[in-house]
Image (tube, rainbow, N blue to C red):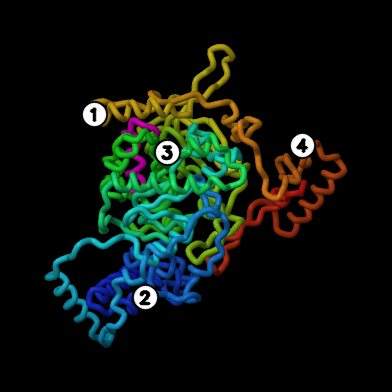
Amino acid sequence: GDYRHEFRDWMESVGEALLKSGYGESATATATACNTGKGDACCGGGGGKLGRISEEEEQQVGCCGGGEAEDGACGCKSEQVNATENDDGDGEDDYDEDDDSYYSDDDDDEEENQEPSIIDLEDMGEAMRESSAKSGNKTRGPPKEMVTPKQAAALKKEGYRLIGTHSAVKLCRWTKHQLRGRGGCYKHTFYGITSYQCMEATPSLACANKCVFCWRHHKNPVGREWRWKTDDPKFIVDEGVQAHVQMIKETKGIPGVRMDRWKEAHTVRHCALSLVGEPIMYPRINEFLGELHGRHISTFLVTNGQHPDAIEQLRPITQLYVSVDAPTPESLEAIDRPLFRDAWDRLRRSLRSLKDKGQRTVARLTVVKGWNSDEVEGYAELIALGHCSLVEMKGVTFCGKSDASNLNMSNSPWHHEVVDLATQLRDELNRLHEAGGDDAPPRYEFACEHRHSVSVLLARVDQFAYDDPVTGERRWKTWIDYDKFQELATRAAADPTFAFGVEDYTAETPSWALFGANEEGFDPTDSRHRKKKKHPKYTHFDKDGVPTHDDAGNVIPEKERMKLRAMMDQKIKEVGAGSTVTALTSGEKLISDPSLMFRGKTIVK
């Protein structure tokens, strides 16, 4: 049988008791290693990369945990981090400042000069009982700050501007792109936000998961419940907007910045609450959202579905996301590595609560090849629980190697692979719709795509689609009338009996943003930019992945296509047809697929 959970539970209880009794810093390291995957000797194989994380990790950052590890003692300081490309932002930090002087190592409340006395193993049980008795008589002091100085230094180094004791903002790469006229993010394509007027933020750097695909490399704390000092929501919004605007000012010198957009960017219109951590953990989240709405800032909040009570109590917001990262309980534990033991039940309850939300709700799927890219029936069943307004499916972006993740480049899907998976999901959802029943979902169809982000959007036909009265063609209204939303939200805040729905603040989706359009989700008012003048060597492929058109879009001569097909046939003989998953001892899953051998090839023009 699988004894790992029982062993982890025992190690956690021992670690907690030792920590309380003063023996903990060295002794609890073993329990921590068990759960973070840093120890190979415990819990049975897989390099120690287990699914669940321990309570001892709740104040950790990466593998150092905000402690005093020196360079080389762990992988945190030597990890290879590429410039990331996330849905709401990435690590393009050329203009971010790194002001470490704000934090002092003196703030660490570690008693470095005190060593605990040595205890024999056979006396450990009695020590634990005594410790428990003593701890019951102690009165708790004031709550501590969430972020330690070392955590703050790690986050600041990656471009975060920390706000108060538990919040942060960071300038999104798409903000900088659209400032330069190089295109907006997928939210611009799907929902009509102005990317250069969007603030990426979080009121809680802590999270209850340590997802394998998290693009932040786990430099933030984790925890199941809020137990830290709580900052005032108005303070967080005021300081956050001020920090964001300051970062906008610093972009003035970036080559290509359009001054008309740069000036407009000083007014924040949107807030993507998806920076890092779990924003809904913040105890005063509704007040925080009210402060944003009071400034006429729209709210896009992403939650991992581990706090259903908070979701149920959430005030009306512009758009609420629940991450649906896996189709089964086993795969959810493997990919999200949740702290809650009932994570699957919490996710299902969170999704069910979306049915009662009058505003736009989104099931968000991040596709990681080899990890969660199958079993569409399970995804469809989860989405059906909430009758979600929209379904976003996005390919994971490889963010570089680190000890916090087992991913590699082969786990990132191509756009056509995401489209194929979304097609299967749509068909399964519509099959459930036809079958009927209490949880039968509404009908969904493709609405939009943003090829640059490897993302597509499925939308409810009953809420967003209509037939053009003149042409009879299917049209979509996935964009948002933001002024109308603010008007409705203000009225709802003043009158709790007032309710409004999705259709009350929709807006027409432009033709260039629709699925299948030639623009592939790129706004034609902007200009495409390719790094180092690199262009795709091939632009179209047949169903087997053999190129059919060259870099200029011209049909490749039959003789050349035959040569390319012969190359693919040879590759198939070597590695086999279809997608092959190879599990490595390090915990990585390596994907091989001959049909992808010609994709990604570039030429310099």
Which sits earlier in the primary sequence, circle 3 or circle 4?
A: 3
Range of the magenta residues? 345-362
Give how far apart the Cα atoms at labels 1 and 4 are.
56 Å
Q: Which mark is residue 494?
A: 1
> What's the residue type where badge 4 is placed?
Gly
Residue 440's place in the image compared with 7, above or below, is above
Q: Residue 268 carries which label?
A: 3
Query: Taking the image as drawn, is residue 516 in sight?
Result: no
Give how far apart the Cα atoms at labels 2 and 4 are.
58 Å
Question: Label 1: few (<14), some or many (≥20) within 10 Å?
Answer: few
Residue matched to label 2: 29
> What's the residue type where badge 1 is placed?
Ala
Report if the CB atoms under discs 2 and 3 are less than 8 Å apart.
no
Residue 28's place in the image compared with 344, above or below, is below
Q: In which quarter of the image is residue 485?
A: top left
> What's the residue type where badge 2 is placed?
Ala
- Residue at image x 33%, y 30%? 358
Which sits earlier in the primary sequence, circle 2 or circle 4?
A: 2
Q: In the shown orientation, is residue 29 left or right of residue 375? A: left
Q: Is residue 590 covered in magenta?
A: no
- Residue at image x 63%, y 42%? 416
Viewer-side label of 2, 1: 1
Report if the CB atoms under discs 1 and 3 are less than 8 Å apart.
no
Residue 256: percent from left, percent from top: 61, 42
Give how far apart the Cα atoms at labels 2 and 3 are.
44 Å
Majority SS type along the magenta span: helix
Which sits earlier in the primary sequence, circle 2 or circle 3?
A: 2
Q: In the shown orientation, is residue 333 left or right of residue 406? A: left
